[in-house]
């Protein structure tokens, strides 16, 4: 139930507390985990209290009423500089500010919740970026588990960060391309540039953030990872060896629990009907997730790259996806050039889209959820990473799993057209699809979920919020 201070019927369930980072890519896996814990034993599992930042809040009405409780934290807190956006965003700075501003309000909320509960909660599951909230829980005697919403490979890279600094490799001595492309012998197949959060994140902020993250992991009762053994066995082993706390591999979480209702934006379901009319493996799905963005010139090049490719596409243009532009306008002539084979939506039901038999490839920014969702449906990728862990994920997609390739350098329509042709129409692309399908089979085996069937029945029909071209 929605409750400002966590009040309401407590029932007799043992309760677990959760605190996700207030961004889509972190909220979703935390709520999926919450759903899985709640559903154990046919819905008679743990009670769940989700503490969450008052900004970017999940909608309590879209979760089961019994046993679920939502507690907003920091209603009065200024949030304008807490949401990073775009490749030049200072992601680490935003994380530090979130911890600073939510820590005190969380102490009040947690104290109040503990006073109201009959029984002590089992633990707090806290996002690995919320060391501040973990310290509050420690202070009030609540044990913590840490949820890492990224890849095991990323955690291994972050664990190596202090040693790379000691060696003088980080921060990079220059922004010279050759220097940034230096392979890291300690972390194959990563390169130096994969270890830089974003161009505007200072080394000091990045160092603080990663120190906090590793402190959170090491002082917890265990680390939960949204990945699976067959995908990242060697990095998982490195974490087990190097972290000194138990590790729980629970992914792919979205195959275990839908996290239904975790989307912060309304998902346009009508694109699924449009996909029903397309041929198998024919459509390129294009989406940059919830935070990444492009400038107006990149939008223009993308539009003409898609148009000139002559392939069907489903393109997500989020309301704030284009930098410094309030109204997104597609170029004149684009609509006519792509009529009948393109669709643009403001936000898609991505997991269902990727599971649709018509999808042949995914142009992605390589957020971990998008990467994992693509892998779990056997969809190969064109990678366009921007910040945080996205470069690391891209490197694994390209070099380790060989299920996609980077769209490197400046976005340019001819380059985009060739990349689409390579992914959808060549033997090389077919090889990537086959390897992605092999990984999907391993993921399904892990989650024991039946393979997703091609959709034939459609659910709710929302008002059309898309642009069908
Ligand atoms: N997503 C969605 N609809 C869209 C685009 C993305 O539901 O149109 C979801 C996607 O399924 C994923 C999440 O948003 O679960 C994005 O997380 P990710 O880690 O990929 O990227 P982030 O948004 O954190 O950069």
Image (cartoon, rainbow, N blue to C red):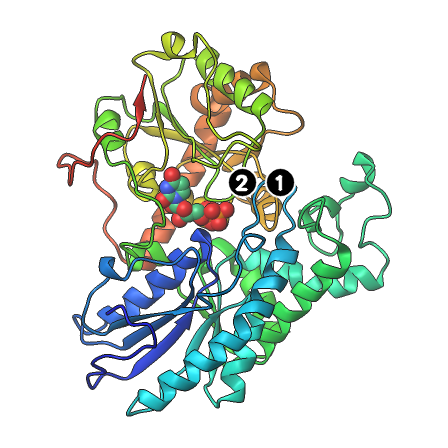
Q: Which residue is label 2 attached to?
A: 292
Q: Answer with the quadrant where ligand 1 appears in the image.
A: top left
Relative to 140, is 352 on the left or the right? left
Question: Can you say whether 180 is above or below 316 in the image?
Answer: below
Give the vertical position of 233 relative to 355 (above or below). below
In which quarter of the view is residue 283 placed?
Answer: top left
The answer to whether the beta carbon of the residue marked 2 is less than 8 Å from any atom of ligand 1 is yes
Separation of disc 1 and disc 2 at Cα? 6 Å
Q: Is residue 373 above or below residue 323?
A: below
Q: Please, which residue is most extreme toward the left here?
A: 457
Q: Pick the quarter of the image with the C terminus.
A: top left
- Quadrant in the rendering for residue 465: top left
Residue 87, label in figure: 1
User: In percent of the image, x 23 and y 50: which residue is there?
Assistant: 450
Q: Is residue 153 visible?
A: yes
Residue 86: image location, x then y, percent:
58, 40
**Which badge, 1 or 2, is on the more N-terminal residue?**
1
Image coords of residue 11 (percent x, y): 19, 83
Which residue occupies 54% across, 64% down? 236
Identify the residue at image location x=36%, y=90%. Answer: 115
Residue 122 visible in the displayed image: no
Secondary structure of residue under mark 1: loop
Label 1, ligand 1: CB separation under 8 Å: no
Name of the residue lying farthest toward the front? 76
Dot 1 alpha-carbon crowd within 10 angstroms: few under 14, some 14 to 19, many 20 or more: many
**Residue drawn where x is 13% and y is 37% of the image:** 457
Disc 2 element: loop
Q: Nearer the viewer, residue 388 or 222?
A: 388
């Amino acid at each position: 139930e929605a409750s400002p201070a966590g009040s309401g019927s407590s029932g007799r369930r043992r309760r677990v507390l959760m605190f996700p980072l207030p961004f889509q890519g972190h909220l979703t896996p935390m709520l999926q985990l919450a759903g899985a814990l709640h559903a154990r034993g046919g819905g008679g599992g743990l009670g769940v209290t989700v503490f969450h930042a008052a900004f970017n809040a999940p909608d309590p009405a879209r979760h089961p009423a019994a046993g679920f409780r939502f507690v907003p934290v920091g209603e009065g807190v200024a949030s304008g500089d807490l949401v990073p956006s775009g490749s030049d965003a200072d992601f680490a700075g935003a994380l530090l500010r979130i911890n600073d501003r939510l820590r005190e309000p969380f102490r009040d909320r947690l104290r109040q919740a503990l006073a109201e509960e009959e029984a002590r909660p089992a633990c707090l599951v806290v996002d690995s970026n919320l060391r501040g909230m973990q310290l509050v829980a420690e202070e009030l005697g609540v044990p913590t588990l840490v949820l890492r919403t990224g890849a095991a490979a990323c955690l291994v890279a972050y664990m190596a960060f202090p040693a790379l600094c000691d060696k003088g490799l980080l921060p990079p001595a220059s922004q010279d391309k050759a220097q940034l492309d230096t392979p890291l012998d300690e972390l194959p197949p990563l390169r130096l540039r994969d270890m830089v959060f974003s161009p505007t994140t200072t080394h000091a902020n990045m160092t603080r953030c990663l120190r906090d993250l590793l402190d959170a992991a090491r002082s917890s009762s265990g680390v939960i990872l949204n990945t699976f053994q067959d995908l990242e066995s060697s990095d998982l082993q490195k974490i087990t060896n190097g972290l000194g706390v138990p590790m729980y591999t629970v992914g792919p979480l979205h195959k275990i629990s839908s996290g239904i209702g975790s989307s912060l934006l309304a998902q346009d379901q009508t694109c699924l009907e449009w996909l029903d009319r397309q041929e198998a493996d024919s459509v390129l799905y294009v989406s940059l997730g919830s935070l990444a963005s492009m400038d107006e010139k990149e939008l223009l090049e993308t539009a003409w790259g898609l148009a000139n490719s002559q392939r069907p596409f489903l393109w997500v243009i989020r309301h704030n996806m284009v930098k410094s532009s309030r109204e997104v306008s597609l170029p004149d002539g684009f609509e006519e050039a792509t009529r009948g084979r393109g669709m643009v939506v403001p936000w898609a039901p991505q997991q269902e889209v990727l599971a649709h038999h018509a999808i042949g490839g995914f142009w992605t920014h390589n957020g971990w959820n998008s990467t994992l969702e693509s892998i779990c449906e056997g969809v190969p990728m064109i990678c366009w990473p921007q910040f945080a862990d996205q470069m690391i994920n891209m490197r694994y997609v390209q070099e380790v799993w060989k299920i996609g390739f980077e769209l490197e350098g400046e976005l340019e329509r001819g380059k985009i057209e060739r990349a689409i042709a390579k992914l959808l129409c060549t033997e090389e692309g077919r090889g990537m699809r086959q390897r992605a399908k092999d990984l999907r089979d391993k993921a399904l085996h892990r989650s024991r979920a039946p393979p997703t069937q091609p959709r034939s029945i459609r659910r709710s029909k929302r008002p059309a919020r898309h642009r069908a071209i």
